[in-house]
Amino acid sequence: MNFAKMADSLNSGSQILSYSLEWDGAKGRGGIFVPLIGFPKDSLAQQLTINTGIRQGELYRFRYRARNIYGWGPYSDVATVLAA
């Protein structure tokens, strides 16, 4: 999963301190999102590889957000990925 760096114009012009990438633990069936990176420990990573527990044909939902000096921003739209 890759996600792009947010432009300063989209985050009050302040430097990003952390990204939080989360996924739906219920594999796309509306479960609670759980953090993969960036929470509780800060991370500026924009790429993550998940190589265990992924099943072909399953749906996975992801979302992310960014934190600057003003706090956490809103979550992105949810991305749904079908494992091939």
Image (cartoon, rainbow, N blue to C red):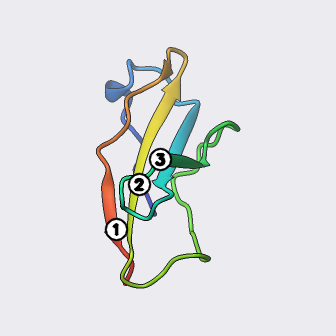
Classify residue 33 as left or right of residue 83: right
Q: Residue at x 63, y 39 (%)?
A: 39
Question: N-terminal of the two: label 2 or label 1?
Answer: 2
Classify mark 1: residues with Cα within 10 Å, few (<14), some (14-19) or many (20+).
some
Checking the image for residue 32, the label placed there is: 3
The mark closer to the camera, 3 or 2, is 3
Question: N-terminal of the two: label 3 or label 1?
Answer: 3
Q: Amino acid at mark 3?
A: Ile
Classify mark 3: residues with Cα within 10 Å, few (<14), some (14-19) or many (20+).
few
> Dots 3 and 2: beta carbons under 8 Å?
no
> Dots 3 and 1: beta carbons under 8 Å?
no
Q: Amino acid at mark 2?
A: Phe
Checking the image for residue 4, the label placed there is: none
Residues 40 and 49: in front is 40
Residue 57 to residue 20: above or below = below
Quarter holding the C terminus is bottom left
> Dots 2 and 1: beta carbons under 8 Å?
yes
Q: Residue at x 58, y 50 (%)?
A: 45
Q: Secondary structure at mark 2?
A: strand
Checking the image for residue 62, the label placed there is: 2
Residues 75 and 16: in front is 75
Classify residue 34 as left or right of residue 81: right
Q: Secondary structure at mark 1?
A: strand
Instruction: Estimate the x, y position of residue 29 in percent, counting from the top left.
Output: 36, 60
Instruction: Estimate the x, y position of residue 75 in percent, counting from the top left.
Output: 38, 36
Q: Which residue is mark 1?
A: 81
